Image: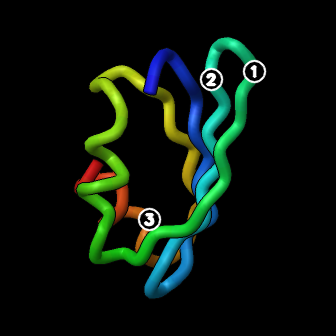
Amino acid sequence: MGTCNAGVDLHRNNFTYCVRTKDGEEAVGKYSIQKLRLFAGQFGKRVPVEVEATGNTWMFCEEI
């Protein structure tokens, strides 16, 4: 993906995401927690990701 921002709604076993590119295109989807690295691998190292603050937010942030 090109330059973008991502937002994540974090749940116990999965998360829903919305990604918006610089051009205004959007992608919405869902991943299982086990595929977190696959999700994170789509982005460069400097892509802002906003994550819902919940009990397992620390784990999510450490992984990405």
Mark 2 vs 1: CB contact within 8 A: yes
Determine the CA span between mark 3 and mark 1: 27 Å
Q: Position of residue 47 (x, y in %)?
A: 43, 26
* Residue, disc 3: 57
**Residue farthest to the bottom?**
13
Please tell me whether mark 3 or mark 1 is closer to you in this view.
1
Q: Secondary structure at mark 3?
A: helix
**Compared to 64, does 1 lie above or below?**
above
Label 2 amino acid? Thr
Quadrant showing the N terminus: top left
Quarter holding residue 25: top right
At 32% from the left edge and 62% from the top edge, which residue is drawn? Answer: 36
**Compared to 34, does 6 lie above or below?**
above
Please tell me whether mark 2 or mark 3 is closer to you in this view.
2
Mark 3 vs 1: CB contact within 8 A: no
Label 3 amino acid? Thr
User: Callout 2 environment at 10 Å: few (<14), some (14 to 19), or many (20+)?
Assistant: some
Looking at the rendered structure, which numbered label has been put on residue 38?
none
Q: Position of residue 32 (x, y in %)?
A: 41, 77
At 66% from the left edge and 31% from the top edge, which residue is drawn? Answer: 20
Earlier in the chain: of badge 3 and badge 1, it is 1
**Compared to 10, does 5 lie above or below?**
above
Q: 7 left or right of 3?
A: right
Determine the CA span between mark 2 and mark 1: 5 Å
Looking at the rendered structure, which numbered label has been put on residue 24?
1
Label 1 amino acid? Gly
Q: Nearer the viewer, residue 26 or 46?
A: 26
Q: Secondary structure at mark 2?
A: strand
At 51% from the left edge and 39% from the top edge, which residue is drawn? Answer: 49
Quarter holding residue 59: bottom left
* Residue, disc 2: 21
At 62% from the left edge and 46% from the top edge, which residue is drawn? Answer: 7
